[in-house]
Amino acid sequence: MAEPQSLLVRPRQLSLDDLQAIHGGGVTLQLDPAAWPAIDASAAVVQRAAAGDAPVYGVNTGFGKLASTRIAADELTDLQLNLIRSHSVGVGAPLPAPVLRLMLALKAASLARGYSGVRPEVVRCLLAVHDAGLLPYVPCQGSVGASGDLAPLAHLTMALIGEGEFVEFDAAGSGAFSRRPAAEVLRERGIEPLQLQAKEGLALINGTQVSTAIALHALLSFEPVLEAALVVGALTVDAARGSDGPFEARIHLLRGQPGQIDVAQYYRRLLAGSEIRQSHMDGDDRVQDPYSLRCQPQVVGACLDQLRHAALVLVREANAVTDNPLVFAGSGSNPDAMVSGGNFHAEPVALACDAMAVAIAEVGAIAERRIAMLIDAGVSRLPPFLTADAGLNSGFMIAHVTAASLASENKSMAHPASVDSLPTSANQEDHVSMATFAARRLLPMIDNTAHILGIELLAAAQGIEFLRPLRSSAALESVHTLLRETVQEMHHDRYLAPDIAHASALVKDGSLARILRTLPELPVLWIPA
């Protein structure tokens, strides 16, 4: 087994590449030594406040609606422990390993900015747990995305203090998991349980690290699916003997939308050199292709713009300080200050996730329309339902029904979560973001879209078979060959569900994306953040 690579964490400077490395696992985290003085300074501010007589929220008062309740000095440690215990109320399945890795890293990076008032031991504990490959047991439901992701971050903190649990997932990817007491696991790994001091429990559970981590997980998981959508959409253009004219650069430059311009370039490269296209350059009486073919740059390009914007928002949020109150260590004539605000409100994440949801749904929706076009002999001029003996065989008739059902599910899930605020904490928290659900619902949407694209891949490849001996472009022929390694041409009706599973796996696992990435001089998918 290869030694894990070390990633230097510079507070406020995590890049999308850094986040992708943490998401994928196999890296250890080393905090930039320049960060420690700021951590020490903010911790000293809190320690002075805890020793003083003035009431300071989060240090010697209750929380939320109970902020006016003063806590005695000899009860400050109990205050933090009770906060974590009372807020560990999550339900549902545990968050997946990539999300948990990101949560640990993002919380450490945020606290290391030096505005949260925690001791260096807190940051070291987070980094040690991450680097040991330990995954706190964190149920996926229970956060409304304001006052921080309180319940899930409380579960994470419960593991750090040795009162919660760690989770181990089945290595085969079955989704099965087991739980072990945190105290036992920490002892085995030689990690001291964290002893919370003033404000540290609050700093650990305030913040948007859970919703941000889930959203980043969705963004990174959708990347190969979006690239596969470009590849499969291009294959469908050739299978339907569509025109490459709508992808001409001049058209898209006149509009000026960057995602549209880039997507058109992807399609030009994918289709370059196709014999199928050359075969109908002359004598084809069709003047214009259906929108699902010729408007792909406009539709998928607009989705790409939304996803690029979401990536920028999420990288900013990954580097942000989002707990409360915030600690400003004094210098010169500026005194120490602890200021209450609302950075824990995850509205930026919620809105980014809502935009991602619409984009994910639209990528699947236009793919479903392309499948419908392929099986309609009157439009595609291929055999009905892509079978040579329609009637005796149903071909792709019901495979399209499956795609339609998944597209419809995505439409429902694309409803914005951010507009559905419910007041909590006796109306103290009277507007919340719902960012955690906004992010969490993206994963089933991505699965649905991947299955739609898997069905389209099967249908487009079948359409290509009817055009032989003509060949598509080199890139698209390699896609066809890759599919045929596991799924053979359909000469008559057969059990199609396994074929859909194989094709969908090629969409999700990056196999089609890797073919796209072999093409020279293509624009990057995500704009560097």
Image: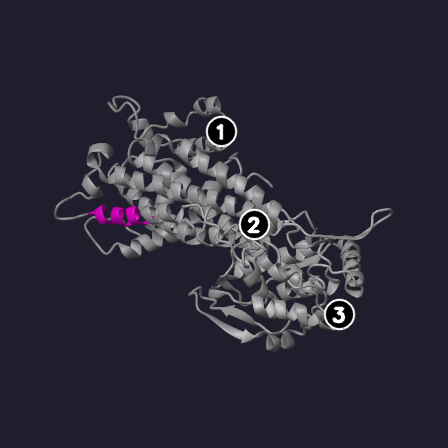
Q: Residue 476 carries which label?
A: none
Q: Which dot, 3 or 2, sits closer to the camera?
A: 3
Residue 488 x, y percent position in the rendering:
28, 51
Secondary element type, mark 3: helix
**Magenta stretch contains residue 132:** no
Where does label 2 land, which residue? 346
The boundaries of the magenta stretch are 395-406
Q: Is residue 169 left or right of residue 326?
A: left
The reply to whether the C-beta atoms of the residues labelled 3 and 2 are less than 8 Å apart is: no
The amino acid pointed to by label 2 is Ala
Q: How crowded is mark 2: few (under 14 residues within 10 Å), some or many (20 or more)?
A: many
Q: Is residue 118 left or right of residue 148?
A: right
N-terminal-most mark, 3 or 2: 3
Q: How crowded is mark 1: few (under 14 residues within 10 Å), some or many (20 or more)?
A: some
**Magenta stretch contains residue 397:** yes
Residue that extends furthest to the right in the rendered view of this protein:
332
Q: In which quarter of the image is the N terminus?
A: bottom right
In three-dimensional space, the C-alpha distance between marks 3 and 2, rounded to whole angstroms, equals 32 Å
Name the foreground residue: 238 vs 181: 181
N-terminal-most mark, 3 or 1: 3
Q: Residue at x 55, y 47 (%)?
A: 347
Residue 465 x, y percent position in the rendering:
26, 41
Where does label 1 land, which residue? 257
The reply to whether the C-beta atoms of the residues labelled 3 and 1 are less than 8 Å apart is: no
Q: Residue at x 55, y 67 (%)?
A: 88
